[in-house]
Image: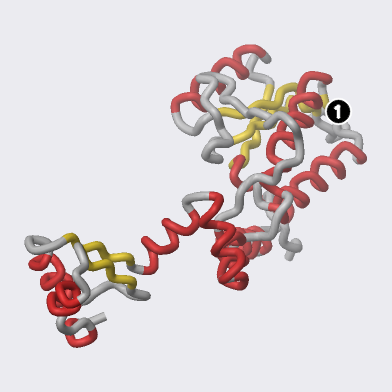
Amino acid sequence: MGLDDELNITERVEGHACGGFIAFYSTLPSSSLNDRLNQLKSRFEVQVFDHERVEAALLGTTGGALIAKRYFPRSILLWSCEHPTPAKLFSDTEKLRCDFCSGDLLNPVRGIFVVWRKHLSTNGIGEVVDFGWCCKGECDRKLRSIVRTKFDFQVLDAWDDIKDMCNPTLFMWRTMTWLNRLHSGERWSDDAFERLKTLLLAVFPHVARHLSQVEREAVQVVLTIPVGLGGMGRLP
């Protein structure tokens, strides 16, 4: 939007006996138009709504979202896919708090979950002895030291981002991987298995939805990684 697209602003405001000027633009105003609007602020109130501000005003309230859904159905569908919110499945929202600092790991979604296994036995079947989640960084380092000491340093850890567990496709892939390992004879302690169920219940409301574009791209990346290396791709 340029200066030539917005002519005679002062005359229009004064001619209609208005107290200010509100501009609605689908793009950002040019630098020359923006300078002109700033100059006019000394004479009357000026507000500019570009596409981002219009979107924020519409989608920042329940009423605005309903208006957008009614008059912009295709746009709101695309926006909803790219800005997913947890599905309302349970009467009480399941919490997932860091095992070290108790910080909320689902608002916003962050942190990692960690599976602890004893070293493989002679028959090649391991045992999951601990399962937890925490913030990245200091909390992870502190908990790693605690768990290793607890099991006399006879355990190995495998971790993944909680955010990946909120990706519908990666959620199903990871769940199928655990089921396949259980079917193959992998043992889980009672506590570890209960914590696995807690994780699945906590993240599932974030899963019951369409994939965003970023999540679709994340799936494509995982598909390039062989199964043996923790991905979803085929072995060469």
Question: Residue 86 occupies which quadrant of the picture?
Answer: top right
Where residue 204 appears, as percent x and y from the top left, is: 73, 42
**What type is the residue that disc 1 sits on?**
Arg
Question: Residue 22 occupies which quadrant of the picture?
Answer: bottom left
Q: Residue at x 57, y 71 (%)?
A: 72
**In this rendering, is residue 82 above or below 150?**
below
83 and 11: which one is in front?
11
Where residue 102 appears, as percent x and y from the top left, is: 54, 20
Q: Is residue 55 left or right of residue 77?
A: left
**In this rendering, is residue 177 above or below 68?**
above
- Crowding at label 1, few (<14), some or many (≥20) Cα neighbours within 10 Å? some
45 and 52: which one is in front?
45
Q: Residue at x 72, y 57 (%)?
A: 232
Q: Is residue 193 left or right of residue 34?
A: right
Where residue 161 appears, as percent x and y from the top left, is: 59, 42
Q: Quadrant of the N terminus?
A: bottom left
Q: Quadrant of the C terminus?
A: bottom right
Where residue 93 appears, as percent x and y from the top left, is: 68, 31
Quickly name the residue at label 1.
187
SS of the residue under disc 1: strand
